[in-house]
Image: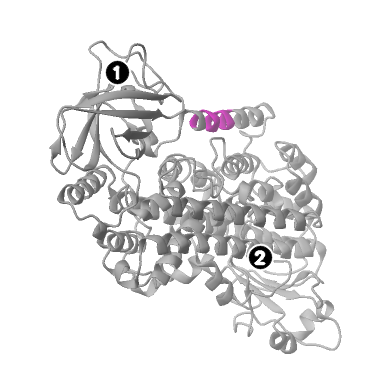
Amino acid sequence: MAEFSVTVSTGEAIGAGTWNKIAVSLVGTRGETPPLRLDHPGKEFSAGAVEDFQVASPQDVGPLLLLRVHKAPLLLPAPVGPVARDAWFCRWFQLTPPQGAPLRFPCYQWLEGAGSLALRAGAAKVPWADDHPILQQQRQDELKARQDSYHWKTYSPGWPHCLDEKSVKDLDLNIKYSVMKNSCFYLKVSSAITELKLKGLLDRKGPWKSLNEMKRMFNFRKTPAAEYTLEHWQEDTFFASQFLNGLNPVLIRRCGHLPENFPVTDDMVAPVLGPGTSLQAELERGSLFLVDHGILCGVRTNLINGKPQFSAAPMTLLYQSPGGGPLLPLAIQLSQTPGPASPIFLPSDNKWDWLLAKTWVRNAEFSVHEAVTHLLHAHLLPEVFTMATLRQLPHCHPLFKLLIPHTRYTLHINTLARELLIAPGQVVDRSTGIGIGGFSELIQRNMEQLNYSVLCLPEDIQARGVKDIPNYYYRDDGLKIWGAVESFVSEIINIYYPSDASVCEDGELQAWVWEIFSEGFLGRESSGMPFSLETREALVQYVTMVIFNCSAKHYAVSAGQFDSCVWMPNLPASMQLPPPTSKGQTRPEGFLATLPPVNATCDIIVALWLLSKEPGDQRPLGTYPEEHFTEEAPQQSIATFQSRLTQISKEIRERNQELALPYTYLDPPLIENSVSI
C-alpha cells in the first residue's frame, strides 16, 4: 500500500467552494484504484482554499496516466448558494508519490452536480505524442462530451453559425459570466437607465430641440476623448482622423484611381489641394485615400417610433497633406450613383450642407461598424473560434492551453447579445436606422466577400495601401501587438511541433481548422480561409490571427464606441430625413430634424456605454492566472510575451503624452484577453 499526498486548489470566485464529497482514483498502466475520499475534520473545498490530503493506494497501478476526480452530494442537502447544484470550481490537483517529483493536474473547470472528470498531468500533448490506449481514449471521450454539450445552430441565414442556446440562463458555468461580472453588468445597466429616466430623456420620442439640449445627454458620462469629440466634431481634420484612429479604423484605403461613379474634378478640390497640383498628380503621388460605404447601397431601413428612417451609401475622398500634415476630406458623394440628384459635397460648400454631408458619412460609419466590423468580425467570428476550440481540442492539447484564455466569456456575451441587442424589439430593432433587417443584410453581404487577409493585420494594411500614411496609430500599435503575439505563438508552436509533417499529422488541429472553415465561413473557398494547415508557418499565422482578433482587434473597435457616440451628432445611429439631393437647402433646423429622436439616442448611448468598458473581472492581454501550461519552456515564453507587451505599452504612453487626443485603444494593459463584453 502506497501513501500519496494530494493537494487541491479551489477557485476564489463567489460560489467556487462546495459541500460535496470529493474523491480521486489513480489510473495507471496496470489498473485503477477505487475512489479514495479526500476528507479531514471540518469543512473542505472552501473558496480560495489550498488543502493537503493523504491517500493510500490499495494497489500498484503502475506509471500514472490519469487522475479521475469524483464529486457526489453529502447525505444531507447542501446549503443553498449563489451557484446552482453546489457547483465547485477546481483550479488544480497536485499528486506527490512516495518517491518522485510531484505531478500537477490543471483543471480550471466548474464541476456541477454529481459526476467524474478525468484529468491529465499538465504537460501539453499533441495527439500523436499519446502512445497509450487509455490516454488516446481519454482524448476521444473528452471531445465527445464537449461536442454533446456545445452544438452549432444557424441564427440567421448567411451568418456564421453560433452556439445553440437561447438564453444565458441555459449556459453551463464554464462559459458563463462569474457572479461578480454578472452583478456588475446589470448594476451598470440599471444605473444608466435610471439616470436617463430621471432626466426625462429615455422615454421621450420627439426630436431634440437644439444642439445645446443634447449636452444634457452628454453629461451622462464624460471621458476625455468624449469631451475632445464635443469640442472638435465639426472640424474637417477631426472628421478625417476618425477614419485612422476612431472606432472603425479599417475601411480607409489608398486611392490609385478615382472610381467611375465618383466624378470628382480638379475645380472641385482646388481650394484644398492648392495651386501647382491636380487630382492626377496627387493620385500618382499616393496622397489620396478613399472610404467607400458602398455595402450600404439599397440596404433595408427601419422604423423608429413608427417613423421611417433613411440610409446612404457614401463615398469619401481624403487628401494627405504634404510633410506629415493632417488628413483632410476633399469630397463626399452620398450615393453610389452620380447625377443631378446626388451632388458631390465639398469643404467649400455652405457650412450646413458640408456638415450634413459629413454627418451622413458618420451615420454610415455607425451602421457598417456596428453590423460588420464589431458584430461580425469582432463577435461572431471569435464565437466560431471559441466553439471550434471547445469541440475539437482536448484540455491537454497545446493549442487548447494557448487559446482557452482568449475565449473566456465569449459565448456568454454573444448569447446575451442575441437576447438583448439583436432580437426583435430590442436595441438594434427599436433604435438604429437600418434595424435588424439591415444588420442582417450587411452581414450577409460582407460574408460573401470576407477574405482571410482582412483578418490578418499586416496583410490588411498592405492590401489597403496604408502602410505609410502618417499618424495612423491603430496601424502602428496594432502591428506591434501582432508582432508580439506572433513571436509568442511561434515559440509555443516550435516547442510542440518539430516539423511541418507534425502539423499535418495532428488530426485534432486539422478538425479544428476545418470546423472554423465550415461553420464560420460556411465552406466558402473563395474566402481564402484555410480548411487545413500543412506548415508550422501557416499554423503560426493562423493562431496569431485568432488571438489578435479575439483580443486586440475587438478592443480597438469596441472601446471607443461610447467616446464616439455620447456626443450623438458625431455618430448618429439613424437619420430621420432622406439624404439631400441638392445643395444650398440645409439649415440648422433641418440638420437637427435629420438626427435621431431623443429616446433612440439615449437607447443607443446606454448600449454603447455598456459595450465600451468591461464591467469587472478583467484579464488584460497576456495575463494568464490559470496555469494551463506547467512546463518551463512555455512558461518562459509567456514571461517573454508579457515583457514585450509591457514595452509596447510604455512606447504607446510616451507617444500619447505628445498627442492632443491620445490613442489608447491598443494599449496592452487595457486590452481584454478575450471578447467578453
Residue at (46% x, 62% y) in the render: 491
Question: Does 187 appear in magenta?
Answer: yes
Residue 372 makes an appearance in the image: no
Q: Which residue is mark 2?
A: 476
**Front in this rendered view, residue 193 or 129:** 129
Q: Which mark is residue 520?
A: none
Q: Estimate the x, y position of residue 443 in percent, counting from the top left.
A: 45, 60
What is the three-letter code of the residue carrying label 2? Asp
Amino acid carrying label 1: it is Asp
Q: Which residue is mark 1?
A: 39
Residue at the extreme right? 275
On whether residue 246 falls in the magenta region, the answer is no
Q: Which residue: 29% across, 69% down?
A: 504
Q: Earlier in the sequence, mark 1 or mark 2?
A: 1
Magenta stretch, main secondary structure class: helix
Discs 1/2, front: 1
Residue 397, placed above or below residue 454: above
Magenta extent: 182-190
